[in-house]
């Protein structure tokens, strides 16, 4: 059968990533395996008060992508509506991760609203691995700010940047 000319599958994996954890990393790897191109896109959200600036987060994710030689990943940031951003980069899929209990209600609401705004943009969920379901960026921030050991909870290639930054008062 002839392959469709527009067969390239592109997705946006949006998040705060404040900072990027091995839970995010796992979702990213699974998205890379499924899509031809993955935009990892840091949401510039004026309402939240992140510890890491948008530039720091983009830089750290890019550093990890380079260090691991990840292919077909573009690291960006965006503000405004996610569906507008997805349209702008030509992505018909949004990737999110789902941890047991803590994410469901929020994700359910956001997905319903995004479908209302843009029925052509589908959200795809990867269930968190059981060993990552306890892991959140806020836990990393808390442990790191008290000089606790975050080894194995964030990608090795960006461990030092994250640990040093979180130790700063
Ligand atoms: P948000 O985008 O809601 O601010 P995050 O930046 O922490 O949240 O996460 C981005 C996406 O990754 C969300 O879909 C979130 O559910 C998912 N995620 C966060 N932590 C994990 C984890 N440990 N395992 C799998 N997915 C996760």
Image (cartoon, grey):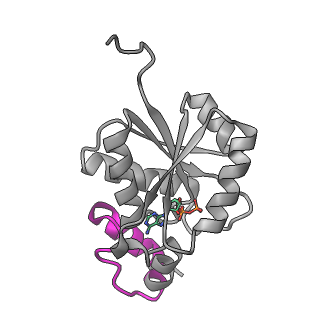
Q: Is residue 71 magenta?
A: no
Count of numbered circles on the image: 0
What range of the chain is rendered magenta? 144-166
Q: Is residue 14 left or right of residue 5?
A: right
Q: Which residue lies at the image location 35% right of the left edge and 79% below the top edge?
A: 150
Q: Quadrant of the C terminus?
A: bottom right
Residue 4 position (above or below residue 163):
above
Q: Position of residue 129 (x, y in %)?
A: 36, 67
Which one is nearer the viewer's eye here, 155 or 105? 105
Q: Is residue 155 magenta?
A: yes
Q: Position of residue 22 (x, y in %)?
A: 36, 66
**Quarter of the image where one finds residue 33:** top left
**Quarter of the image where one finds residue 87:** top right
Q: Which residue lies at the image location 55% right of the left edge and 27% below the top edge?
A: 90
Q: Position of residue 108 (x, y in %)?
A: 65, 59
Q: Quadrant of the N terminus?
A: top left
Which one is nearer the viewer's eye here, 140 or 2? 2
Which one is nearer the viewer's eye here, 106 or 76? 106
Q: Position of residue 16 (x, y in %)?
A: 57, 59
Q: Is residue 89 left or right of residue 21?
A: right
């Amino acid at each position: 059968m002839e392959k469709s000319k527009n067969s390239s599958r592109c997705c946006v994996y949006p998040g705060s990533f404040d900072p990027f954890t091995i839970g995010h990393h796992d979702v990213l790897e699974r998205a890379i395996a499924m899509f031809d191109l993955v935009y990892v896109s840091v949401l510039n959200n004026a309402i939240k008060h992140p510890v890491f600036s948008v530039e720091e987060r983009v830089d750290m994710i890019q550093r990890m992508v380079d260090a691991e030689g990840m292919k077909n990943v573009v690291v960006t940031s965006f503000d405004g509506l996610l569906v507008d951003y997805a349209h702008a980069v030509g992505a018909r899929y949004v990737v999110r991760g789902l941890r047991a209990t803590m994410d469901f209600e929020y994700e359910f609401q956001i997905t319903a609203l995004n479908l209302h705004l843009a029925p052509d943009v589908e959200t795809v969920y990867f269930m968190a691995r059981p060993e990552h379901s306890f892991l959140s960026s806020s836990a990393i921030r808390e442990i790191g700010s008290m000089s606790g050991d975050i080894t194995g909870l964030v990608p090795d290639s960006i461990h030092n940047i994250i640990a040093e930054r979180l130790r700063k008062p």
